[in-house]
Each structure stands twice: as structure tokens, then as C-alpha cells.
Image (spheres, rainbow, N blue to C red):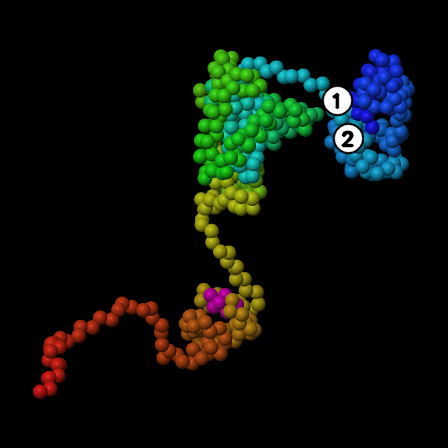
């Protein structure tokens, strides 16, 4: 077999010399080889006809499913529909057809046009998570200034607090804050239009910007801040290996932001801090005060004088039963207020837990006591002996005294022979020694006043001993043997 280079040399030599043998001598081969190469080159190329594929009949179905799912459906999920449509081929051929349909769909799905940011217009924010650490990221679109902070949770109060800190860091307020459709900032979605939460609306009105939200399930609309989330994880969070507390983590985040904002950005080929100095001239001024904590939820006080938030219960004063209260979270505390007036404050607890204030119930917690309600004549007669009889009844029931009702009836009969006062004294003594039978009460009554009475221990006994003469030890020595 001659290589393509050798065949090209043979064709060139034959075109110059016009003889098979002369070209063979020049190229170092035989005239037969030269003739075969020239004949093969002179033959017209045969076009191979494309063989039909087993998936050709399903091209319309596959293209429609790919378009309906925005290119996310897999061949595995599409296989049942194709089998129902008469497909008898292998899953491998279907995967190839779906891959080709997805590639074709990506080319015609959207026309991308580069976003040209305007100075002072957009600030893009988003949250990221790595393990148990939550990362808040913000990018000023025109100057590409980056802001990164860490937090314990992604609730509305934390988001608005960090957003206010971001405004103070860049020295102004942009015209629009573009956020993902995070649950802490949206109050609902109507016809694909996001309704901001009331707290977020009050915050935006205080600072003077317009809240905006990205398209649902469309990461391309916030790729700028998504890149920052990944950059913060790979260049700051993961290399650090963790921090002892949140304050230390945010100090490192501030140093990291100062470092990256002082370097040339590869996209704009400029230093973000330098561009920020020019962009501050078109940013809106910061308000003189931070806004008050906006309510994040409204709850109704139940009959237990509590409200539920985050699957936990928190107590409130009893005069608010049946009324609605406003909830806000500030620095790890749940602030409960009515018409702007704070009425209770609790430390945020975990799901299923309770945070109760004894002042809201007027007394400290105590164990429940079951009331004694005598019904039969024997029970009424025994309980009429007073508090000692009730205490005796509770103790006898707790000890598991068998046939207690019969024993109580027999004890009551003893009062007719010995008197009520002696019976009550006998019950008190039996209660002291934990004896709950009628025979025990009868023995105490027969003993009468001769039974010893227990007394509490008194002071230590102190006795003055008489003084005795003291002899030295030498007086007890044995005389040495002579």
C-alpha cells in the first residue's frame, strides 16, 4: 500500500513524463503500480448512500419531547414512549438520536446577545451552600466589584442585613437588585411574575431601589453571580478548611474581597476598585439610618398562649389569645410585636422545641395534680376526714395497695369505736411509716399513746468532761535491766 504522499508523487511524475515506466523509474516502483494509482485516481468517486436508521421514524417525537423539556429529557425516560410508538431498536441507538436532537435544539433554542451593563444600574445577588456554610454573594454588574459574606441561615432577615452591608461597602445603592427566586424574598408567583415579600418591599422602598427576579429555571440569566459563588467556594471556602466561628470567617471574606477587587478582572480588563470609584458618582446615596426589622411572618396566638414559627412554639402574653402578631428574626432572636410594639423576644430554637416565658403564664411550671372526687358513700366518708385522709389515699394508691376501696371502708369503721381525732392521728402515723392497710391502722389505735413519736434530729450533744491529771510518757517507761 502506497501512502498518500507516495501516490501524490506518482501522479506528479506521470503528469510530467507521460509514461508509466518513466514515472516508475523516477519514483522507485513498478510500472504496474503507477498504472493502478493513475486508474484509481481517474475513476469517479462513488457516493455512499446513507442507510436508514431505526430512529428515523421517531425523529418528530424525539424533537418534540426535547423541545418541551428544554433539552433536559433523557433517552431512558423517552424509551417507553418510543416503544409505544413502535421502536424496536436498542437503547444505544436511541441515546445517539436523543443526543443529536439535543445538540440541534441547543443551536436553535436561544439567540444569545452579550449583556452590556450600565453604570449604577444592576447589583446581582445569590446564595450558595458548601456543607453547613451559607455564602452570600453580590456583584456590581458594571464595575464587577464582588461582595462575599458567610451566614448561618438564608432567611429574609439575614439576606436583607447582608444586602444593607453590601450597600455600605460599595458606598451607594444601585437602581435595580437582581436576585434569584429565593423563597425568603418572594411572596408568591402569579403568571410567572414574582410578587416580592412585604418585608423586602419595605426594605427596597427605604433604600430606593427596584427589586427584580431572574427567570425561573434559567441559570443563564444570573451567570455573573453564579461564577462568583463557585469562585468563592474554590478560592476561599475550601482552601480555608473551616473557621472556629462566623466572625473569623467574615473577616477572611473581607480580606479576600479586598484582594480580588484590587486585581485586574479578566472580563473587563480593569481593576474593579478603580471602576467603582467612577461608578459611585451615579449610585444613589445611602439613607441616614438602616430600616427597622421588617416582619417576615404573621401568626395567630392560640389558646396555649403560643405561636408557631419554624415548627417550634414561642409564648406570648395571655391577653393576645386569638389576635395576630408580627414576627421578625434579628441576630438569632425571634421578635414578636403588635402594631410595631415589641411584646416578646425569644431565642430561636430548633423544630419541635419550645421557648416559654413564665411571666406569660403568671407562675412557674408545676407538675399536674389529679383532683380527688369521691363518689361512693365509703369514699365520701373517708375523704371527709380531711387533708390527712387525702394524702393517705394518694400514697396508698401510688404504692399499689390491693383492694384499696375495701381497706378504706374498714378504716372508716374504726372511727366509730376510737373517734375521729384518734383515727386522723393514726392515719398520720401510718402515712409516716408507709403502712396503708386497715390492720396497720387498727394496731396503731390499739397501741394508743404508748407508741414512740419520731422527732427530727436536734443539735449535737456537747458534754463537759472532768479534768484529769496528765502524766508524761516517761512515767510509763520500763526500768532498764541491770
**Position in image of residue 45 (x %, y %):** 89, 21
Q: Which residue is mark 2?
A: 99
Q: Residues within 10 Å of mark 2 (few under 14, many from 20)?
A: some
Q: Residue at x 12, y 81 (%)?
A: 477
Residue corresponding to mark 1:
107
Q: Is residue 188 above or below residue 111?
A: below
Task: Indicate which disc residue 289 carries.
Answer: none
Residue 202 rendering spot, x and y as whole percentages: 54, 24
Q: Residues within 10 Å of mark 1 (few under 14, many from 20)?
A: few
Magenta segment, prevailing SS (helix, strand or loop): helix
Residue drawn at the location 50% of the way across and 40% of the way down: 348
Displayed quadrant of residue 423: bottom left
Please tell me how many numbered marks the rendered image carries: 2
Q: Is residue 222 left or right of residue 429?
A: right
Q: With 412 as the anchor, is 45 left or right in this view?
A: right
Magenta segment: does it hold 152? no
Q: Does any portion of residue 463 appear in the rendered image?
A: yes
Residue drawn 56% across the image and 44% down it: 351
Part of the protein shown in magenta:
391-397
Amino acid at each position: 500500500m502506497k501512502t498518500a504522499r507516495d501516490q501524490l508523487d506518482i501522479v506528479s511524475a506521470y503528469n510530467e513524463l507521460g509514461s508509466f515506466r518513466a514515472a516508475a523509474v523516477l519514483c522507485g516502483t513498478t510500472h504496474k503500480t503507477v498504472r493502478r494509482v493513475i486508474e484509481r485516481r481517474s475513476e469517479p468517486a462513488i457516493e455512499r448512500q446513507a442507510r436508514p436508521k431505526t430512529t428515523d421514524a421517531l425523529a418528530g417525537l424525539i424533537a418534540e419531547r426535547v423541545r418541551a423539556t428544554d433539552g433536559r429529557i433523557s433517552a431512558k425516560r423517552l424509551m417507553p414512549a418510543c416503544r409505544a410508538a413502535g421502536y424496536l431498536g436498542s437503547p444505544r441507538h436511541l441515546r445517539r438520536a436523543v443526543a443529536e436532537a439535543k445538540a440541534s435544539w441547543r443551536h436553535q433554542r436561544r439567540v444569545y446577545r452579550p449583556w452590556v451593563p450600565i453604570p449604577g444600574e444592576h447589583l446581582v445577588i445569590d446564595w450558595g451552600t458548601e456543607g453547613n456554610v451559607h455564602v452570600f454573594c453580590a456583584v456590581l454588574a458594571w464595575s464587577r466589584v464582588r461582595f462575599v459574606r458567610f451566614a448561618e441561615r438564608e432567611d429574609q432577615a439575614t439576606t436583607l442585613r447582608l444586602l444593607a452591608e453590601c450597600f455600605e461597602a460599595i458606598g451607594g445603592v444601585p437602581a435595580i437588585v437582581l436576585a434569584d427566586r429565593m423563597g425568603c424574598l418572594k411572596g408568591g408567583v402569579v403568571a410567572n411574575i414574582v410578587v416580592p415579600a412585604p418585608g423586602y418591599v419595605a426594605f427596597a422602598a427605604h433604600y430606593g431601589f427596584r427589586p427584580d427576579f431572574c427567570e425561573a429555571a434559567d441559570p443563564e440569566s444570573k451567570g455573573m453571580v453564579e461564577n462568583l459563588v463557585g469562585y468563592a467556594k474554590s478560592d476561599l471556602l475550601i482552601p480555608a478548611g473551616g473557621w472556629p466561628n462566623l466572625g473569623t470567617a467574615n473577616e477572611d471574606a473581607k480580606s479576600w474581597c479586598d484582594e480580588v477587587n484590587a486585581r485586574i478582572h479578566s472580563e473587563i480588563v480593569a481593576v474593579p476598585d478603580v471602576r467603582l470609584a467612577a461608578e459611585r458618582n451615579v449610585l444613589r446615596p445611602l439613607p441616614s439610618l438602616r430600616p427597622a426589622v421588617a416582619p417576615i411572618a404573621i401568626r395567630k396566638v392560640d389558646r396555649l398562649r403560643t405561636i408557631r414559627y419554624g415548627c417550634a412554639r414561642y409564648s406570648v402574653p395571655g391577653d393576645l389569645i386569638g389576635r395576630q402578631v408580627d414576627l421578625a428574626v434579628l441576630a438569632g432572636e425571634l421578635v414578636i410585636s403588635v402594631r410595631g410594639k415589641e411584646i416578646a423576644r425569644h431565642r430561636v430554637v430548633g423544630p419541635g422545641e419550645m421557648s416559654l416565658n413564665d411571666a406569660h403564664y403568671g407562675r412557674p411550671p408545676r407538675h399536674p395534680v389529679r383532683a380527688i372526687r369521691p363518689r361512693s358513700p365509703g369514699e365520701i366518708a373517708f375523704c371527709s376526714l380531711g387533708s390527712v385522709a387525702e394524702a393517705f389515699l394518694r400514697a396508698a394508691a401510688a404504692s399499689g395497695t390491693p383492694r384499696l376501696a375495701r381497706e378504706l371502708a374498714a378504716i372508716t369503721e374504726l372511727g366509730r369505736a376510737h373517734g375521729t381525732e384518734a383515727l386522723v392521728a393514726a392515719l398520720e402515723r401510718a402515712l409516716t411509716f408507709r403502712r396503708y392497710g386497715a390492720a396497720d391502722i387498727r394496731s396503731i389505735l390499739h397501741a394508743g399513746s404508748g407508741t414512740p413519736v419520731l422527732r427530727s434530729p436536734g443539735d449535737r450533744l456537747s458534754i463537759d468532761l472532768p479534768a484529769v491529771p496528765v502524766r508524761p510518757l516517761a512515767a510509763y517507761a520500763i526500768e532498764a535491766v541491770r
